Amino acid sequence: MTDAKITGPISASKIVAGAFQSKPANVIVVAKSGGDFTTIQAAMNSISVPWGTSTVISVMPGVYTEDNIVLKDFVHIQGSGREVTTIQATSPSNDIITVNGRVNVAVSGLAIKGGNNGLNIVSCSPTINDNLVTGNNQGLNINYNATPVITGNIISQNTMYGIYNRASTSEIRSNIISGSQQGIVIDSSSPLISGNTITGNTLSGVYNVVSTAKIFHNVITNNGSLYGDIFADSASVPNISFNTFDTIVGTTTVGQYNVKSDGSIR
């Protein structure tokens, strides 16, 4: 984000990128005016550095109406904060950001709104942190042996699912997940679900299908009466421990040291 010390056109030399351990070799500025590009996809298309060279696409405050953004390797899309930098889909049938088989990628500090999948993650390990993902059909769709780390996001008011995790070993930590039909769906996979607040979802908070998830230290309350705060089908054996939740549907779960929202022992 700009401040009083930045004057004149925005340039890469005035930006400090925080996602990499050291300053990236390549910084591209996207801004409504005064940057290198006015769209994120144009910035992505411009990257021609040698493979393995880290690039930050630093997105200044504003609303960017675009979708079908496909990440390249070693790229971090870094917004100026989810309160001030928004990617708004051009169509609710389009995915907004896709990360497919890429390495060393990250998405942070953005509001991601109004698409089919806010983020579509396939067979890779991106870091997704401090975003607002809202108003999509699915907030995050995770598929095919992906291992993303998803932390500190607000994932709210997505029509179907906050997160759909299929055949992937994700780390889903310290997020707020609310206001969708289902908060998290765990399908044929064993993710770590830890430290999240999962509340106000219509059908279920966490829905397990053929799941061996580790569900630890979450607050999972006030979710739908049909499948409860937590649901586990007969082929699921999730470990549910150290959580706060009120309702559970299914008898195949394991775990201990859970409490209800009134503080009573389960």
Image: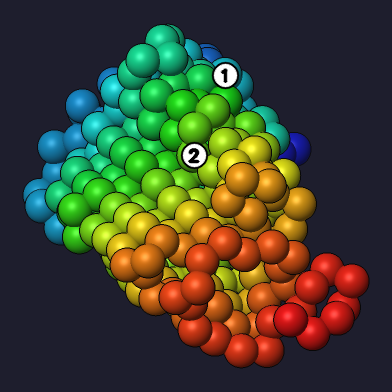
Which mark is on residue 103?
none
Eye-nearest disc, 2 or 1: 2
Q: Are marks 2 and 1 in contact (CB under 8 Å)?
A: no
Q: Residue at x 54, y 86 (%)?
A: 255
- Judged left or right of residue 99, residue 52 is left
Q: Closer to the camera, 149 or 212?
A: 212
Query: Residue placed farthest to the left in the image?
Result: 50
Q: Secondary structure at mark 2?
A: strand
Q: Residue at x 62, y 64 (%)?
A: 248
Q: Closer to the camera, 182 or 128?
A: 182
Q: Closer to the camera, 77 or 159?
A: 159
Which mark is on residue 161?
2
The mark total stands at: 2
Q: Residue at x 36, y 42 (%)?
A: 141
Which mark is on residue 63?
1
Vertical side of 244 occupied by 101: above or below: above
Query: The C terminus appears in which quarter of the rendering?
Result: bottom right
- The picture places residue 246, in percent across and down from the top left corner, at 74, 65
Q: Is residue 18 visible?
A: no
Q: Residue at x 25, y 32 (%)?
A: 70
Vertical side of 148 occupied by 99: above or below: above
Q: Quadrant of residue 240?
A: bottom right
Badge 1 density bin: few <14, some 14–19, many ≥20, Cα 10 Å:
some
Q: Closer to the camera, 21 or 196?
A: 196
Mark 2: amino acid: Tyr
Mark 1: amino acid: Val
- Judged left or right of residue 239, residue 62 is right
Label 2 – label 1 distance at C-alpha: 24 Å
